[in-house]
Amino acid sequence: MSGSEDRRLILALDVYERERALEIAECTADYLWAVKVNWPLIIGSGLEIITELKQVTGLPIIADLKLADIPNTNRLIASKVFEAGADYIIAHGFVGSDSVDAVMGLGKTIIVVEMSHPGAKEFIQPATDKLIELANELEPFGVIAPATRPERVSYIRSKLKPGIKILTPGVGAQGGRAGDVLKAGADYIIVGRSIYASENPRKSARMLYAETLGV
Ligand code: XMP
């Protein structure tokens, strides 16, 4: 295993229980760039889980709240989440630049420009070009794009300003493949069930990490 600068794997830790979350994070941390927490874990274990995960793993924490509210509410939520130790927050772009800007004013932000599930074709995909424009204007840390559609990741990469990272959920349980999406231009892959629901999360993380090397 090499240094953390080579790591391109993000664990989506979508379990409810605090102890299980800490155990999985600890045993996979060697292979991860960051840990992503979403509503299931925050609802099940409280916001303090962010602080605890940071202490246990020493890794950056991404809060995948997909914030989609008016600027004031986005700001109220994001300030508590950054205060708890989150390093990045994921926000929806379709609510408009003022709502995203409210989050960006508080810390590093990742904007959803397209989603990985089939229903993303109904409303989000038709708006992707405008969401990319928004990202190019605001220059967030990164954008979320679908690992389930590598051709869309290539397209998004071709339109996005250099320097803005592409993070891609959808590898494994949703059908995406690590090599394909990294070759298409993704910087990081986000993987949940294929790691946390496997019999041996450490081994699964190690195998995915190995897949990301040399792409
Ligand atoms: P699985 O178990 O499918 O988990 O590997 C994927 C994780 O990523 C989240 N997810 C998304 N987040 N845009 C996002 O911002 C997306 O298109 C998207 N698709 C999946 C999902 O909630 C889970 O935490």
Image (spheres, rainbow, N blue to C red):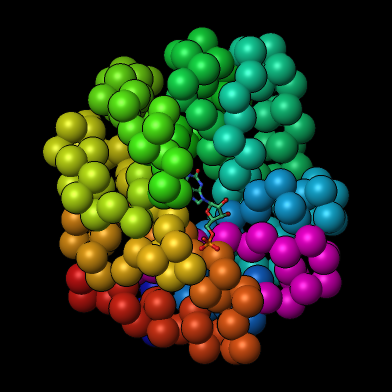
Task: Tell whether position 21 is magenta.
Answer: yes
**Where is residue 72 shown, x and y percent of the image?**
69, 12
In this picture, residue 150 sits left or right of residue 52:
left
Task: Tell whether position 118 is magenta.
Answer: no
Q: Residue furthest left?
A: 158
**Where is residue 10 shown, x and y percent of the image?**
49, 62
In this picture, residue 110 sits left or right of residue 147:
right
Image height of 133 relative to 174, above or below: above
Image height of 200 relative to 149, above or below: below
Quadrant the C terminus occupies = bottom left
Residue 48 seen in the figure:
no
| Foreground pick, 11 / 5 | 11
Q: Which residue is painted at 63% across and 39% down in the image?
A: 65
Q: Which residue is painted at 65% across and 53% down in the image?
A: 37
| Foreground pick, 96 / 161 | 96
Q: Which residue is painted at 52% across and 17% down in the image?
A: 95
Quarter holding residue 53: bottom right
Quadrant the N terminus occupies = bottom left
**Where is residue 185 shown, x and y percent of the image?**
21, 53
Image height of 62 relative to 70, above or below: below
In this picture, residue 183 sits left or right of residue 213:
left
Image height of 141 relative to 27, above or below: above
Quarter holding residue 196: bottom right
Range of residues picked out in magenta: 6-24
In this picture, residue 208 sits left or right of residue 80:
left
Q: Which residue is painted at 57% across and 60% down in the image?
A: 12
